[in-house]
Amino acid sequence: MSERMKRRTGSVLVLLVLLLTVVTGCGLFDSSLKEEEEVESLSPEENGDLLVVGFSQLGSESVWRTAHTNSIQQALSEKNGYFLIYSNGRQKQENQIKALRGFISQRVDYIILSPVTENGWDTVLQEAKEAGIPVIIIDRKVNVSDKSLYRTWIGTDATREGEAAGKWLEDYLKRKRKQYDDINIVVLQGTVDSTAEIGRSTGFLQIASRYGNWHILEQRTADFTMAKGKEVMKSFLQRYPDIDVVVSQNDDMTFGALEAIKEAGLTVGERGDMVVISFDAVKDALRLVQDGTINVDVECNPNQGEYVREIIDKLEAGETVEKENIVEEEVFTKDTLPENLDERTY
Ligand code: AHR
């Protein structure tokens, strides 16, 4: 069967499953899919050339995540030749595995997986491989024994991000002539076993281990959400009366932590009680860098959609693609903010 015929068959299957979803009301995929619209637009005669892509996003836990999802949806739009099936895993690996199995049974042309954690993907990725469906991993990584289970990974270098945070603190303490002081640090970690948590923790600890006077009082997960960020920070403040530095592995947890710090009557920033180091660099957080609330924000670039599109184009053209593709990112302080914050896309 030709590639084109395979795709048409795939499209018909997608149509049938979506029709069943609408008729029975038992949705396999997120309700934000607007099934009816997609059923209407998926006429195999008219849209037989659309590439059908199943996208398993890990959740909607952060502002960053929304930007990441938007970037994929915009790049893989119908006008660009794609029929995208979006599934929200709601931060649970079992939901993502279920979604992947759904994509496999629909025989989509490509699967995009943005995995919540690194481990536990071997079996389902083997199933995709056996079905001949290329899998593209984005954002976080998967830890599998056989690297041929996916075609390529596109994301950011989380270890380098953690190191950048550590190096910034190193320079800052020197500038403030505090390099020999005892520095008490707490770390709000992201989802345990996610690449962003592993990399940022490892990178920061690599720098911290050079200094006997940097004391990591505690590292605890707050799952990359604002609500948990506040809860964990509150508990840190009750436990440790003398925190000098808060390292928060994403902006949402930082927003929550800042609320807890304010409610405890403490201050942050250059002249405050605590230094705040954050990750992601979403627009609202950069405004807080601008007003001196957050000292530094290490960027994690969510605009990965165009990279994914390029990769698929190459695979379609039979070209080889790199196994790892790292997107560019920067470190923002008050002095290095982008010129026009309002024009920032996230
Ligand atoms: O994997 C990227 C991380 O996940 C981002 O830092 C965070 O905001 C998101 O939830």
Image: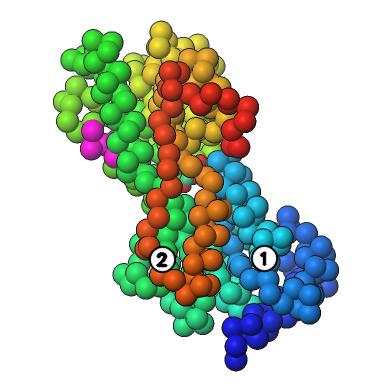
Mark 2: which amino acid? Answer: Val
Q: Which residue is painted at 48% across and 42% down in the image?
A: 301
Q: Residue 203: percent from the left, percent from the top?
A: 29, 40
- Distance of mark 2 from mark 1, alpha carbons? 20 Å
SS at mark 1 in the image: loop
- Comparing 335 with 95, the one in front is 335
| Front residue of 75 and 195 | 75
Within-10-Å neighbours for mark 1: few <14, some 14–19, many 20+: some
Which range of residues does the magenta coloring cover? 203-207
Q: Residue at x 40, y 12 (%)?
A: 270
Q: Which mark is residue 81?
A: 1
Q: Is residue 329 magenta?
A: no
Q: Quadrant of the C terminus?
A: top right
In the drawing, does residue 153 fall left or right of residue 184? Answer: right
In x, y percent, where is residue 256? 54, 28
Q: Could you say which quadrant of the image residue 49 lies in?
A: bottom right
Q: Nearer the viewer, residue 147 or 121?
A: 147
Amino acid type of the residue that numbered disc 1 sits on in the rendered structure: Gly
**Image position of 48 (left or right of 116):** right
Q: Is residue 320 positioned above or below 340 on the image?
A: below
Q: Which numbered marker is on residue 321? A: 2
